Amino acid sequence: MKIKKSKVVVVGCGLVGSSTAFSLVTQGVCDEILMIDINKERALGEVMDLRDTIKYLDRNVKVRTGTYAECGDADIIVITAGAPPQKGQTRLDTLEVSAKIVKTIVDPIMASGFDGIFLVVSNPVDIMAHYVYKLSGLPKNQVIGTGSALDTSRLQNFIAELVNVDPRSVYAYSMGEHGDSQMVPWSTVTVAGKSFQDIIQDNKEMLGEVDLDEIVKKTTKEGWEIYNRKGTTYYGIATTCVGIIKAILYDENRIIPVSTLLEGEYGQEEVFAGVPTILNRTGAADILEIHMTEEELGKFIDSVNVIREYTNKIL
Ligand code: NAD
């Protein structure tokens, strides 16, 4: 008898990759983590630091450095290698550098016989996820971008703050591009089942005029607000990655707005975009196609068109 170990590979041991590994270790999510970086010393340094946590944790997650040749039996490979946008750049400006980096990673991983799930984090994430899908030749359910999952967490925080409830009681999605064109289908937002529009209507005195566009803008800009203060962001995205990894490894059927290939959903074809998706052991198992108003759908399509335009530059 052989009990299979759960194995996650993190490629790119910078701030996002190492924070993801830290979160996997402290939450005891998998049996083994392999850390890979072009900068081998950096990867080793992160591994050594992560190992020092074990004595004080509930689980002994084995962390070590590795090579692409050892990826064949991995369950999930998280790609966080990239060139984060510098001041004044958008995520889309990093497209060409990121694409070059991603190609040097995916080719040797596929040569190892890998048949698990890619979780792409590197920006511009929707386009990089599509690129990994093309390069790998894996079925679409096995390639996932983090998409608008992090933006959704930010959005839920803002709504929760406004109505003074726990963000986990807010059901809202940011959708489309993980970038400036993302949108929120407000007609579908609820707080524990009560429509947000009714909440605004019923609590006019307490809430006053609620500027929904301003909330979308704040959600979109939150990454930059953090960037301006600390130079980068990583706890939010690392924890988002771990939420997605748990949904997959534990076969949760949890719905998270990740970037996945649209094939007719929302009238869109052949494009990766952030949409609510059912995640389980097969990866992106299915898309939950929510009903939007015509105006919302128009905004979603505009956002998808931005992704499509940039995707066409590299595919
Ligand atoms: P970082 O500069 O701290 O780390 C990047 C790491 O990638 C470095 O350790 C570098 O050595 C490694 N690397 C570069 N080229 C490589 C290659 N060819 N092979 C293997 N490793 C390579 O950057 P970071 O802050 O960790 O950000 C990483 C990526 O994540 C960026 O693209 C950033 O924009 C993205 N990001 C995405 C989200 C999201 O929501 N999707 C959020 C935050 C950051």
Image: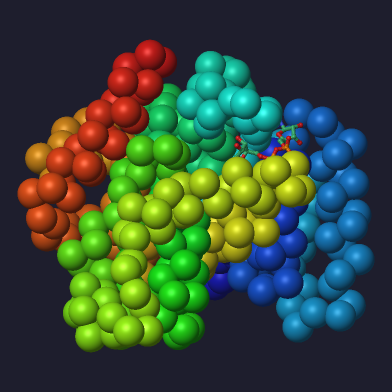
Which residue appears farthest toward the top when viewing the image?
313
Q: Quadrant of the N terminus?
A: bottom right
Q: Is residue 193 left or right of residue 179?
A: left
Total residue callouts: 0
**225 or 49: nearer the eye?**
225
Q: Is residue 180 visible?
A: yes
Q: Is residue 222 left or right of residue 164?
A: right
Q: Is residue 33 visible?
A: no
**Image height check: is 115 above or below 309?**
below
The residue drawn where x is 60% and y is 43% is: 224
**311 or 59: nearer the eye?**
311
**Location of residue 286 in the rendering, given as x and y in whole percent from the top left corner:** 23, 57
Q: Is residue 290 left or right of residue 243?
A: left
**Location of residue 84 in the rendering, given as x and y in whole percent from the top left corner:** 65, 33
Q: Quadrant of residue 149?
A: bottom left
**Location of residue 138 in the rendering, given as x and y in whole percent from the top left corner:** 36, 37
**178 or 113: nearer the eye?**
178
**Image height check: is 105 above or below 12?**
above
- Which image quadrant shows ligand 1? top right
The residue drawn where x is 59% and y is 19% is: 97
**Location of residue 78 in the rendering, given as x and y in whole percent from the top left corner:** 57, 46
Q: Quadrant of residue 56?
A: bottom right
**67 or 155: nearer the eye?**
155
Q: Quadrant of the C terminus?
A: top left
The residue drawn where x is 68% and y is 44% is: 227
Q: What colouring method underlies this structural image?
A: rainbow
Q: Is residue 151 left or right of residue 287?
A: right
The residue drawn where x is 31% and y is 21% is: 309
**Image height check: is 116 above or below 206?**
above
